[in-house]
Structures are given as C-alpha cells and as structure tokens.
Amino acid sequence: MSNLFLLGCDPELTPGKAALLISCRTAFAPRRLRPALGDFSGSVYPVTPLPEALEQMADELQRGDIAVLTGGDPLFFGIGRRLIELFGPDLIIHPALSAPQTACARFLEPWDDACFISLHGRDDDNFAARILRRPKTIVFTDHRRTPALIAQRLLETGAGIGIAQENIVMMIAEDLGTPKERLTKGCPREIAEMRFSTLNIVIIKHKRPPPTADFVLGLNENNIRHSRGLITKDEVRAATLHHLRLPKQGVLWDIGAGSGSISLEAARLCPELRIFAVERQPEEQDNITANIRRYQSGNITLVKDQAPEALKSLPRPERIFIGGSGGRLTEIINFAAAALAPQGIMVVNAVISSTRDKAPALLHQAGMRVQTTTIQVSRAPFPPETDEIINFKPITIITGKK
C-alpha cells in the first residue's frame, strides 16, 4: 500500500521530512519550492493546473509512495482539504508553520483574535466591507487581489461609511523565510502606492476597534434616521426579515428602500451579504447614506434611481424585498421575478389595498408559490394609559418562493 506524504515547507524541509521525501519515487512541488527537493532523484511534477496534477498523483500513487510539497500548513486554506477528499487514508500530513503564525510572530501581533479571509482565486467584491467590520483580519492574497488593491478598496469603502484611513493599520509580510523576506507596515493610503511580491500575507487591524452593538437584530425607529414617520415599524421589520430567510452570503435587493431600515438590519445580521438599497427620493437617499455611515454598513450599496430601470445593472439576487414601488408594481415584480435566483424568495410589504390585491397574483403569474400574512401592531405601556396606546394600520406581508 502506497502513501502520499504532504510535506509542509517553511521554506525548507526538516531532516525528518527530507527522509520521507527520499523514500518516494515521485514528487509534486510548485516552482518556488523546487529548491527544497535538493538532490531528489525521482520524477518531479508541478502542482498546477491542479486538476491535471491530481490525476497524475492518483496514477503515480499506484506505483509507489509520492510526496507533495506545500508552503506552511496545508490544512489552513491550502491543498490539504482537497487531498483528504481524494486520497483519504493514503494521505499522511506533516505541516510546517502556517503563514499567519509566521507573519504575526514577525510583527509581534497576537492572532487568536483575528478573522480570516482568503481572496486567493476567489471573486469577492464585498471583501473591503467585511474587513472593515472586524477589529483584526488576516487576508490571503493572489496576483490580482494584491495588498495595494486591498488598500485602495479599504480607502474607497471606508470613505463611504465614515472610517478614517488613519485608523487602519496594514501589515504585509512578503516571501517569508526566504532571503527576500520583507515586512511593511502602514496605513491604506501608503500601502496603495506600493508594490509587493506575489507571495505575501496581509494583516489588517483598527487602531481603535470599530463600534459594535451587543445585538445583531433589534434596531428601533429611534435608532434609524427617517422622515415624517415613514419607516417600516419594528415589529413588521422583524416579521419581514423572518419571511426573507436571509442567506449568509449572496445578494439582496431592497427596492423602494425608504430609510433603509430593512437593509440596515439585514446588513448587521449577515455581514457577508451584499445589499443594494434602491431608492429614488433624494430625502430618503440622504437618510440611507446617514444610516450607512452611522452603523458603518459597508455591505450596503445605495442605488439612486427608479426601479425597475435601476435593477438592470445589479448582480442577480437570492432575495428581494419590495417596500415601495412608486406606482410601478407590475413592472417591478415582473422584472424582479425573472432576475431572482433559483430557490430565491421575494417579499412585498403591502400598506395600501392596491398592492395587497395585485402583488399575490403577480407573484403567482411569475411561477412562484405565494403566501400572505397580515399583521396588526398595537403598542401600549404598562401600567396602561389610554392616551399612550398606539394602533398601527394592518400590513400584509406577501411572500413568493421560486
């Protein structure tokens, strides 16, 4: 029975790992780790493209032991997960120190309180908002998502939500463990003007931690800037979010966003969700902008336009909320239903009778399973005082599921 040895380099092999390598007939290594092979006499193959390399590994494993060289800890955003899936009990892992361990040691920075984001080979347009919500983040980069690009996105997103770039510290460790190792520390504006080796890891932290609340759901009307009492009431907002069944990641369209109360609660509940608040009224646009800055909700994008035209350039949504239609309910629902992702959910809140009467039929005609829920909210203090009892108009929550 043959073994696949997954050997972590940092960047050299320890004597024990070197002995395992010598026992193998074949090795796989990225170009930058080829020097660690020393005078290895067996066949050597690249690890990219990965699909072809995995097929070659499976073939070579039939003939004898093989070694795969990798940087750091292969079970930490590395190739280890994939090899476990494919080779299971034939796999023996000998990790090295991970890049985060080494980088944090160099900068004398504890890392047990850090969050991690990998941008390596991933398309993630929302990463700056995710980073800025956290006190400390360690980021894995690639040749496209460079430290300079990350810094530029932090500047742009931070400016939109009121985070001063001077409060952000970026630490970049390049070519760790090699003669070319370099450590750089600075604010995003400084880092955005610099170039770095493709082999790097980035640590980002706030000098002063970003403000956080001790709850993720429960903003009330007094916590959200709005105009003339035009805001989704707290109890209705909670019920609406329940019907939306928000995913952890994906896209939410908040159409006719008003003050943005639904967007704000969704952003706090699901920091990795991308939210587009579509609003045509300038006064409400100002309210949304103020609320985004107050709660530093960088995952909300304000779209200053009328639906459905404003929706045509937005990414495909997994969830859609319609709080207002400006008299164009039919057009909006027809467009939104066609754009909604499979298994997506659309929720329409109906205050006026025309919306309550039309929306269910429009969702049904679009091929969705429809349910309506009508709620009546009353508020009263205790002990009760008659003049302080408030009865709000009934609201119908109309939910369509693909």
Image (spheres, rainbow, N blue to C red):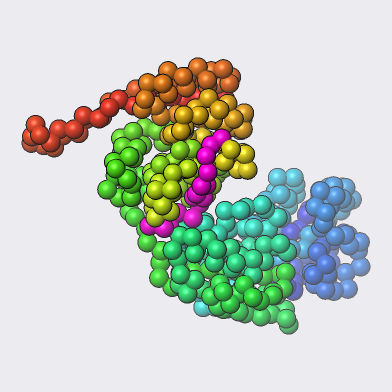
Image: 67 above or below 251: below
Q: Which residues are magenta?
A: 293-308
Q: Quick one: quadrant of the C terminus?
A: top right
Instruction: Judge left or right: residue 173 versus residue 268.
Output: right
Quadrant of residue 121 within the rendered picture: bottom right
Q: What residue do we see at 46% from left, 29% from top? A: 327
Q: What residue do we see at 74% from left, 45% from top? A: 86
Q: Is residue 116 magenta?
A: no
Q: What residue do we see at 72% from left, 69% from top? A: 198
Quadrant of residue 391 within the rendered picture: top left
Residue 154 appears in view: yes
Image: 196 above or below 126: below
Instruction: Judge left or right: residue 68 versus residue 192.
Output: right
Instruction: Judge left or right: residue 321 versus residue 318.
Output: left
* Horizontal and vertical percent position of residue 253: 52, 39
Q: How many tags in the picture? A: 0
Residue 269 appears in view: no
- Which secondary structure is most common in the magenta stretch? loop
* Horizontal and vertical percent position of residue 264: 41, 47
Q: What residue do we see at 52% from left, 43% from top? A: 305
**Foreground residue among 281 and 82:** 281
* Horizontal and vertical percent position of residue 36: 80, 72
* Horizontal and vertical percent position of residue 52: 85, 50
**Foreground residue among 104 and 260:** 260
Instruction: Judge left or right: residue 397 versus residue 25.
Output: left
**Foreground residue among 235 and 131:** 235
Q: Is residue 296 magenta?
A: yes
**Foreground residue among 57 and 47:** 47
Image: 107 above or below 126: below
